[in-house]
Image (tube, rainbow, N blue to C red):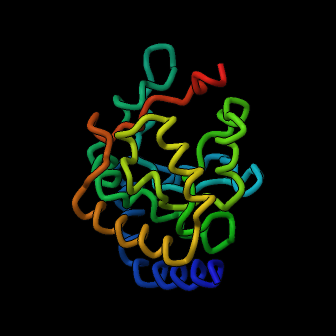
Amino acid sequence: MKRLFDVTIATTLLVVLSPVIGVLSLKIKKQMGAPVLFKQQRPGLHEKPFYLCKFRTMGHGTDVNGELLPDHSRLTELGKFLRKYSLDELPQLLNVFKGEMSLVGPRPLLMDYLPLYSDDQKMRHHVKPGMTGWAQVNGRNAISWEEKFKLDTWYVQNQSFLLDLKILCITIYKVLKKEGINQQEEVPMEKFRGSKEVI
């Protein structure tokens, strides 16, 4: 039932939002150049790697040595707008359609984090990663990594269709209200370096 729901909603949104996706693609191409999409390998169900798709929000700015500038220096005004309203996440509907992600589940994080998880934290990979999740509607980037992982684990242990519907409704409300976004100009939170109990 969850897979059928995911495919139905993802397909419907891709069709309905195709004009928006098209306009955003053109704006990104004009202001930031190619590629329009940012693709990065992330761990999915049972830690199986897949390529996450997002709209690009940062430019290619480099320093005198040719090294990329810090994220906050490369984040464009268009990128800030996309992140503010979570529009950069729209291409993930393709990941949902392909079965690599679900609409609801723990957010897919970096491959580098896999060796840092405790046994409890690894439980987040017992389900497909999601475009939104229990941690996202309960703090998003405003909570610590430990709190986020506890919320992810709670979701895995208590997941249900009704809970997914609840999370989706809260997500829509929070996106419109712009709640739970990191306060530092929508720059991602600090990287996870392992929990105290793991180190």
Residue in view at x 60 percent, y 81 percent: 7
Residue in view at x 34 percent, y 49 percent: 31
Residue 55, image x and y in percent? 46, 55
- Of 160 and 106, nearer the camera is 160
Q: Is residue 174 above or below residue 69?
A: below
- Of 117 and 79, nearer the camera is 117
- Of 13 and 159, nearer the camera is 159
Residue in view at x 34 percent, y 48 percent: 79
Q: Is residue 130 above or below residue 138?
A: below
- Image quarter in which the N terminus is found: bottom right
Residue 59, image x and y in percent? 41, 39
Q: Is residue 122 left or right of residue 78?
A: right
Residue 148, image x and y in percent? 49, 43
Residue in view at x 67 percent, y 47 percent: 41
Residue 186, image x and y in percent? 32, 41
Q: Is residue 70 left or right of residue 52?
A: left
